[in-house]
């Protein structure tokens, strides 16, 4: 008997549930599917029970439904242009229709085009039957759609959904820049068919800057490179590599350190992407040719363009506006800060002072009757200099002095002693007749933080190089990591910049907790502040 190779049912389950990594990736896939089928509008509804509904105005007929149900059908590859609007399709084999199983238990489908209507459901149980070659899907007794279109209801969410992350990720889709295609999103308690009340449109970000057209290899490589006017986020930075209308990845083609202000896209339909989720390029001979052409283009056109464009990056009027924003934000920070102190312990600080002969004689008579207020003033005059932000926002316990001895606050022998009391005083007479007076003064160790008035958030610093976070939030406390490279970079630039950095972290925490709808405005403000800082640094360097 000849040997046989079979397909185990677990293959389908692994493929369907471990290819797409998150709910937002699934939604992006399904939005692109709607684009491929000539939809002009897509509505995403996030329900309070965790379900998500995706509706479009395209719909499927009998032939479209048969192709939809045939997994691995190459019709999108052979029919690479959509029938009605002649769009370059993003998909190839229709594998994305199983993507929902990564994050949801089931999907209900209703579709209508002209006289054809269909309603059915797909769940994980279908995968167990697919290895036999087919899996029957029973029709659902559902009301027909009131319009031509398709409705996908994904229910039984396995993870918590974040609508702001959904919006952010959908905004990255290249299809949003295509004509006659709009995507809207909303939240709702209950689902209503094709109801746009309370929805908002998701638009691709518009990045202003110097644009360099790209057309290489006889039109096989086309696109546009942008040298941005503003700092770019990690998601925006790099040249998007597109196959069809799908962004596969972003790359700087080996020039990462030089192209931190460069974005844009290049499309090469002859490249091959990974079979299922299209998140990587297959590095074959076609890719090697493409990569070399792009490297040459970056060297010949993009890098010289960076130098030319820097001269006109910011106009005088824009510079004035940014400085005004900078001034207003700085004043708002000062007016809303409120210092808080808490005694954590005490330390004995050694104080040395040169005293005139007459004063030294007078002090010798009273060496055992030192007033606490005078000693406190002496201690402050010799205290190590700190920046104003470190004094107000960071713990003094983080600092060390070679001559300081720290005593625990819990010691009963110390807690009843008044602050500033001095220990034994030692006098050393100098050749000029002056006296060097040395004494040990007991000083409190204060943990200093600042709170934002009327907002109710405290800022507490910590230092942990093993923690990659620059901050985290617990209830109404924002913990800021002093070891984070961003914190350290701002600290070296001076108090004002470090203060702005910490305030920005707190503002983000407040916005996300109390006003999530204002997150986009906050991101815009942060970008403006970043530009203002850059302008300030440029002016200082020139001076």
Image: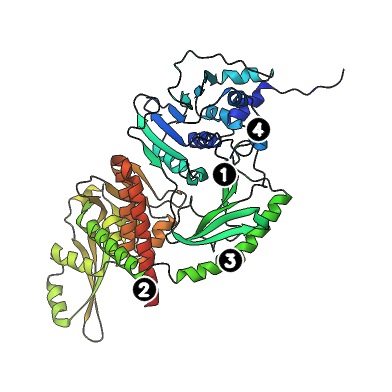
From the viewer's perspective, is 297 left or right of 474?
right
489, above or below 279, in the image: below
Q: Nearer the viewer, mark 3 or mark 4?
A: 4
Q: What colour scheme governs how the chains and residues are painted in the rendered image of this protein?
A: rainbow
Confirm or deny contact between disc 4 and disc 2 (CB under 8 A).
Answer: no
Secondary structure under badge 1?
Answer: loop
User: What residue is shown at x 47% (from left), y 31% (from top)?
Assistant: 56
Query: Residue 141's x, y, as percent?
Result: 48, 12
Camera-nearest residue between 239 and 470: 239
User: What residue is shown at x 45% (from left), y 36% (from top)?
Assistant: 41
Secondary structure under badge 3?
Answer: helix
From the viewer's perspective, is 199 left or right of 458?
right
- Disc 4 target residue: 75
Return the disc, 2 or 3, that comes first in the chain's sequence: 3
Judge the density around disc 3: few (<14), some (14-19), many (≥20) Cα neighbours within 10 Å: some
Which quadrant of the view contains residue 542?
bottom left
**Residue 178 visible here:** yes
- Disc 1 target residue: 245
The CA distance from mark 2 to mark 1 is 44 Å
User: What residue is shown at x 51% (from left), y 23% (from top)?
Assistant: 114
From the viewer's perspective, is 115 left or right of 205?
right
Return the disc, 2 or 1, that comes first in the chain's sequence: 1
The CA distance from mark 4 to mark 2 is 60 Å
User: What residue is shown at x 78% (from left), y 24% (from top)?
Assistant: 5
Query: Residue 288's x, y, as percent?
Result: 70, 54
> Disc number at residue 540?
2
Judge the density around disc 1: few (<14), some (14-19), many (≥20) Cα neighbours within 10 Å: many
The CA distance from mark 3 to mark 1 is 24 Å
Return the disc, 1 or 4, that comes first in the chain's sequence: 4
**Residue 256 visible here:** no
């Amino acid at each position: 008997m000849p040997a046989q190779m079979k397909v185990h049912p677990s293959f389908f389950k692994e493929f369907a549930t471990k290819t797409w990594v998150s709910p937002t990736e699934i939604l992006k896939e399904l939005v692109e599917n709607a684009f491929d089928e000539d939809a002009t509008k897509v509505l995403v509804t996030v329900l309070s029970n965790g379900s998500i509904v995706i509706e479009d105005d395209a719909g499927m007929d009998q032939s479209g439904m048969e192709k939809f149900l045939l997994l691995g059908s190459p019709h999108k590859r052979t029919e690479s242009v959509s029938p009605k609007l002649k769009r370059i399709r993003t998909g190839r084999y229709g594998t994305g229709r199983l993507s929902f199983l990564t994050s949801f238990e089931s999907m209900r489908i209703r579709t209508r085009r002209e006289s054809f209507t269909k309603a059915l459901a797909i769940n994980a149980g279908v995968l167990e039957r697919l290895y036999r070659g087919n899996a029957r899907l029973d029709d659902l007794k559902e009301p027909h759609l009131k319009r031509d279109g398709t409705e996908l209801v994904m229910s039984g969410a396995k993870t918590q959904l974040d609508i702001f992350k959904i919006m952010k990720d959908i905004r990255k889709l290249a299809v949003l820049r295509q004509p006659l295609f709009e995507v809207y999103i909303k939240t709702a308690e209950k689902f209503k068919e094709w109801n746009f009340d309370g929805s908002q449109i998701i638009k691709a970000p518009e990045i202003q800057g110097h644009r360099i057209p790209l057309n290489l290899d006889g039109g096989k490589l086309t696109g546009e490179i942008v040298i941005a006017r503003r700092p770019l986020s990690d998601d925006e930075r790099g040249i998007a590599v597109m196959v069809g209308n799908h962004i596969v990845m972003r790359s700087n083609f080996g020039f990462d350190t030089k192209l931190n202000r460069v974005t844009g896209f290049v499309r090469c339909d002859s490249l091959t992407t990974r079979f299922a989720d299209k998140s990587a390029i297959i590095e074959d001979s076609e890719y090697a040719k493409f990569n070399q052409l792009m490297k040459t283009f970056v060297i010949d056109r993009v890098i010289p363009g960076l130098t030319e464009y820097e001269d006109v990056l910011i106009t005088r009027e824009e510079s004035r506006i940014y400085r005004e924003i900078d001034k207003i934000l700085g004043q708002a920070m000062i007016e809303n800060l409120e210092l808080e102190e808490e005694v954590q312990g005490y330390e004995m600080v050694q104080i040395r002072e040169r005293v005139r002969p007459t004063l030294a004689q007078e002090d010798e008579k009273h060496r055992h009757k030192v007033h606490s207020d005078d000693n406190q003033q002496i201690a402050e005059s010799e205290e190590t200099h700190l920046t104003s932000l470190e004094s107000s926002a960071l713990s003094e316990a983080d600092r060390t002095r070679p001559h300081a001895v720290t005593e625990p606050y819990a010691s009963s022998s110390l807690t009843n002693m008044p602050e500033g009391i001095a220990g034994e005083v030692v006098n050393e007479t100098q050749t000029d007749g002056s006296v060097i007076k040395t004494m040990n003064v007991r000083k409190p160790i204060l943990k200093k933080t600042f709170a934002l008035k009327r907002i109710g958030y405290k800022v507490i610093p910590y230092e942990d190089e093993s923690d990659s976070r620059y901050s985290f939030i617990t209830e109404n406390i924002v913990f800021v990591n002093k070891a984070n490279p961003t914190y350290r970079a701002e600290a070296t630039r001076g108090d004002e910049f470090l203060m702005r950095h910490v305030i920005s972290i707190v503002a983000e925490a407040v916005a996300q907790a109390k006003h999530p709808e204002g997150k986009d405005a906050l991101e815009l403000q942060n970008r403006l502040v970043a530009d203002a800082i850059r302008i300030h640094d440029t002016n200082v360097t020139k001076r």
